[in-house]
Image (cartoon, coloured by chain):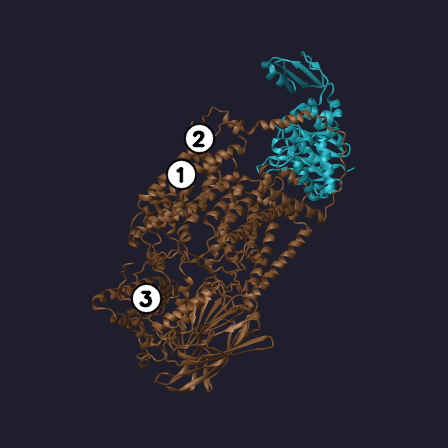
Amino acid sequence: MWYDIFKFEIQYRIKRPETYIFFIFIFFFSLAGVDFVFQGIDMGSVKTNAPIVIAKAMAAVTAILMMVTSLIMGVSVLRDYQYNVESLLFVNPIQKRDYLAGRFLGSFAVLLFVFTGLLLGFALGEFMPWRYPENLMPFNFSAYLQPFITVVLPMLFFGSALFFVSGALSRNLMVVYTQGVLLFVPFLLTKSIKNDFLQALLDPFSLTTLTDMNALFTATERNSMLVPFSGVLLYNKLFWSFLGLLILIIGYFKFDFSAAKNKTPEKKKINTIYDLNTAADENLKISFVLIQYNFKTQFVQLLQLTWFYFISICKQVSFWAIIVCALIIILINSINLNIAYDVASYPKTYLVIKELKELSLYFFAIILIFYSGELIWKEREIKLDLIYGAASISDIIILLGKFLGLLLIYIVLILSLIIFGMAFQTANGWYHHELDVYFYGFFVEFFPFLVLYTFISFFFQALTNNKFTGFIFVMVFVILNTVSEFFGFEHDLYKFAGSGLGSYSDMNGYGHFLASYLWIKAYWIALGILLLILASILSVRGTETSLKKRIELGRQRFTKPLLQFVLALLLVFTLLGSYIFYNTNILNQYQNTAEELKFKADYEKELKRFEYLPQPKITDVKLQVELYPKTRAYTVQGYYILSNTLKEPIYKIYLQKPLGPEINLEEINFGREVFLDKHYNQYGFYIYTLKKALQGGEAVKMKFKQTYTTKGFKENDSNSSVLQNGTFLTNKAFPTLGYSKEHELDDTRIRAEFELPPAKGMTKRNDKTELTYAAAGGSADLINFEVTIGTEKRQKAISSGILQKRWTLGSRSYFHYKTDKPIVNQYAIISADYEVSKSRWYPKNNSSAVPVDLEIYYQKGHQYNVERMIQASKLSFDYFSANYGPYKHSNIRIIETPAYTQQAESFSGAVTFSESNEFMLNIDDQSDVDIILYRTAHELAHQWWGMQLQAANVQGKNMILETLAQYSALMVMKKKYSKEKIEQLLQKEQEVYLQAKKRYHKQEVPLELVEKQDYIFNTKGILVMYALQNYIGEEKVNFALKSFIRDWNNSNGILKSKTSNYPTTKELLTYFIEVTPVSLRHKVYSLFEKTKFDYI
Amino acid sequence: MNSLNISNLSKTYSNGVKALQNITLDIPVGMFGLLGPNGAGKSTLMRTIATLQEADSGCVKLGDIDALKQKHELRKVLGYLPQQFGLYPKISAQVLLHHLAVLKGITKQKERREIVDALLHKTNLYEVKNQNLSGFSGGMKQRFGIAQALLNNPKLLIVDEPTAGLDPVERNRFYNILSELSEKTVVILSTHIVDDVKELCTNMAIINKGEVLLKGNPLELINQTEGKIYQKTIHKNELQEYKKEYKVIAEKLFLGKPIIHVISENNPENGFISVNAGLEDVYFSQILSSSKKHL
């Protein structure tokens, strides 16, 4: 008997178009499955078709497709109730066992068929044009089949069992739609399990499980070996399969095999009440109502419908299930404000908002997709549609009411999130709630996207006239909209919904990003309204459902006022689009990523030959900077003195303008006759031939004027240096000399596309030219620096050097800085509305050293760590001046920069810290590492390692600059904190190092040859230096460093003054070796020259 | 008062079924019965009048309103009770009635409350107005259906098989409401129950397979058939023979034996006795002849 039901189920499904739609959807999705799951993840030397990669991608894709599983399995019993055939069916002599087994197995067979699309898609995906052959191994079908059987099938079985049973027991379509996605809730919950084994065991999608398995193997093994079906993976699969079986058994007993269930005694009682009261007032006259149909009527109708649908969603059990799940996720994952080393930030409103958005986004997406379908279909599902259709309400009002009802749901949820966020802040002792930031963060940054995608979802639901197809269309649309970016469709004018707003900054608010964001959102919302109108015209009213008929009917429904409105809206849409286009493409220059890459490739192809040509060095910089923060503009007038430090004469000067069409370089004047070759103007690369060559030892004064003008707004503006509050320019923002290596592409694969040779990385330690450069291009050694900055009155302008004078003129403030000693060519020009905290460091028992003025510039309200920074600076100066030599200047400034960068930077006499990082850290002295001290000491150490002593721009440069700064910071920490704290810090660093080491595939370079690998020069660096000072003692290390800086510092180094070369790690190591007893020397060598490293 | 004029209305479904063929009807104020077997096209016709379905050709006019083109205008004066409908389960009759009243443009709260209360009384749902609709019986649901159809004082009321599944008491009450309304309103009632039409309607039409077979006043139609109907009790196994020999328009069982009605201009003798014609006989004779025509 069960076999007949099984057969019937299969025959039924074979005829349904959904079956094939699902198959095709899964197939195409799986074609790009690996790329989708691993996009943006550095896989190292693991190939993209390694079995483990396939297994993980398959598991992830199956997890995403759990919704399809639910749609197939969940409806198989529900269907009988939906079409009211249950009473016909269940009176037949079918046994419950046969019925359920037949239905389950039949649906499961169909599910397996549909999911063969996954297997085929993945296998064929290997041959897609976007896969790079160098990342692939030879095709091996068993690498696909094996994980499909061991990983995917058990997942499908569990999902099938769960969805089948819940569908059969709940008999609620909404349960079927949502349960597939709600399965992510337990998955997310397992993320918070601390025990690795348990976490791997309980992960329903076995993603963590596979990651854990993965950790056991080397890269080669990962490529060559099938994922063994043993260990925790086996247990995981057994666990979930048994759970599935258990659910089936429970479902079997719970399932009530009778049709009479729906009639509850309660309802009969209502009938009784009625029957007793039959005395109807049949003679009652029905009053006459005057029906007006004007704007006010429609408005009242709209309000009524909005509220009605809002309430109707609120009454859904499934809605509350989603809310409860979201609540659980938010409560368990909690708001995580950790920045570094497990130290949290203060619960600033914008950080809380960011977290809340991330935690809830997934649930908003569920609500958006499913409830828009639910609302569109509501009347038809309960068969009230004909009554609705005959009422004299316009189509657009009905649809708009549903739309606004759903928006109202979002609004209420967002308001609850805001209340939750404020409660969280209050619970953490933070009472500065910033309601305006909450409003902007949710209703400006977030809500428009919900609105726009709701338009899309409504449109597709109306267009397809099939709920499932509607869901699939929406998802395909989202995928296409994302994927199209990779084909160059990046402009906000044709990328639906445009881009996000970028981060909020206390200093700069949303800055200049807000205006363009709002224009673009207005443009898309105009289109969204058009789509909604189109949806209302195409929506089903009555019994005509074919799209063709609806399009014909649509003409009739296009009434004259509606037509006028649509035309007006089209006009608005076009005008907005034109205005945006005018701003992004006419006032400004627009380049998509491909064009940007091509520009860089061309730059290199055309100009590489000018690299290393003899150039003078900048020895003096004098600038008159006028900043206009409000209009985001500046003009810089001034000069460089260029000296020929070489022996041979220089005939040509290669001047590189900072790139960008908004920057203009003019009035260039060398004080002698020159001939300008404009051939490379498009790269901002100007070649000046001096009529009279610049002889060795001779200097020339190059005057110039540089302007920056903001015109309108740009597409996807990434400029975060010229700002309304917090302008942050460095020496790189001004003209440089010679070919600029910084513009080169560094991704070997992209370079290959432009037929460029693979990136070389940093230069070898024996390169004669680069040894004389301390920075790429080597424009300068040391410079005399003088700057006058004018800015808005309320802002303070800061730079390197001593403040000579400060005055105001009209509505502007002026600041004149000048250095008393030559500095490294690393300076910053910063302007913002700052508070200042001042202090002074006095040298201890060293009368020859001068006191240093400490100044902290910070945003009002960000005073939390200012005192710590001052103390940290004092401790640092104590240690560094005692152990490495005196500080060269009489002041140091720590400056807060807007949240756009997290990075701290060092300049001559100045350090910048980010508002979203150091200035916001909330350090608990009991449990946390004092990151403020650590970071401050690190950055201040650069005043020695980087400012006093520069390293040659070759391999190992970062060991000299960064590793030594790390060591210096660690020693300052050691002075203040207990051994336990230091070990806590090192423990964290070690974790980071080991994790990074696993991720990077290439043979790890030894520390002395490190290039740009942050995890080596910073993370491993500190561990190595800690080991070194354990071997030979802190004093000896410091002695070596002191000698190193004595010999190699850039103002009067004993060895440095004899050569134009800068030191490398080769030199540094000789100092270390010198102070090491012979017996330990091999150990010290191996620390720096070998990669094998025994951790502490 | 406006009457409803249907002229040459045709509709063929995409599967080839001719649901309406050249239907022409003039329906004055009062109760109009639309009689026909299942699948005759009654519901298609009613949905087309009710702006919910498109016709291929033809014209439907209520006074000056072109029902096929000025849908919105028609809906303002339309009350429609579909053959099958459902209700939101989780709200009460009163709330839903208010909601539907707003949809029909009754946006003034006071007016709306008055008419909703009046209709609840009228349809005898006032006592249960706060009950959830999921608990309503078939009769209550049907009365709710009529209540919603009357919300906007319709000039045209279309009720599609309203009494299916109602018990006799419910049915009577329902018809009382309708007949009261029909004094000022065009009421179109579709049914396959002949007695309903006879009792209620001043005018009627019989349609089958999309065609109007007969239209007129029920009593006149009965008169036309009067004297042509004969009846005989026969044996079961004789039925086929009689069907060959006579125009058998109806057969029914009485105490387990078949009684047949035949239509004949002259007395067929042979044990047949003349009986008074009923609307039923008119109906069946029309259906029979239309079926023969199609064969």
Q: Residue furthest left?
A: A1079
Residue A367 x, y percent position in the rendering: 53, 46
- In the displayed structure image, the side of residue B137 where residue A182 appears, left or right: left
Q: Regarding mark 2 in the picture, which secondary structure is present there?
A: helix
Q: Residue furthest front?
A: A845
Would you place residue A537 above or below residue A917 in this image? above
Of the residues under marks 1 and 3, which one precedes in the sequence? 1
Q: Are the residues tagged 2 and 1 within 8 Å (C-beta)?
A: no
Q: Which residue is mark 3?
A: A1010
Of the residues under marks 2 and 1, which one precedes in the sequence? 1
Q: Nearer the viewer, residue B45 or A45?
A: A45
Residue A351 x, y percent position in the rendering: 50, 57
Q: Are the residues tagged 2 and 3 within 8 Å (C-beta)?
A: no
Chain for disc number 1: A
Q: Regarding mark 1 in the picture, which secondary structure is present there?
A: helix
Residue type of the residue flagged with mark 3: Val
Chain with brown colouring: A
Image quadrant containing the C terminus of chain A? bottom left
Would you place residue A105 above or below residue A850 in this image? above
Q: Nearer the viewer, residue A26 or A871?
A: A871
Residue A990 x, y percent position in the rendering: 34, 58
Q: Residue furthest right?
A: B1
Q: CA distance from mark 2 to mark 3?
A: 64 Å
How packed is label 3: few (under 14 Cα within 10 Å), some, or many (20 or more)? Answer: many
Q: Which residue is mark 1?
A: A157
Would you place residue B17 above or below residue A184 in this image? above
Q: Nearer the viewer, residue A741 or A918?
A: A918
Q: Which residue is mark 2?
A: A252
> Total number of numbered labels?
3
Residue A760 in sight here = no
Residue type of the residue flagged with mark 2: Tyr
Residue A74 x, y percent position in the rendering: 47, 37
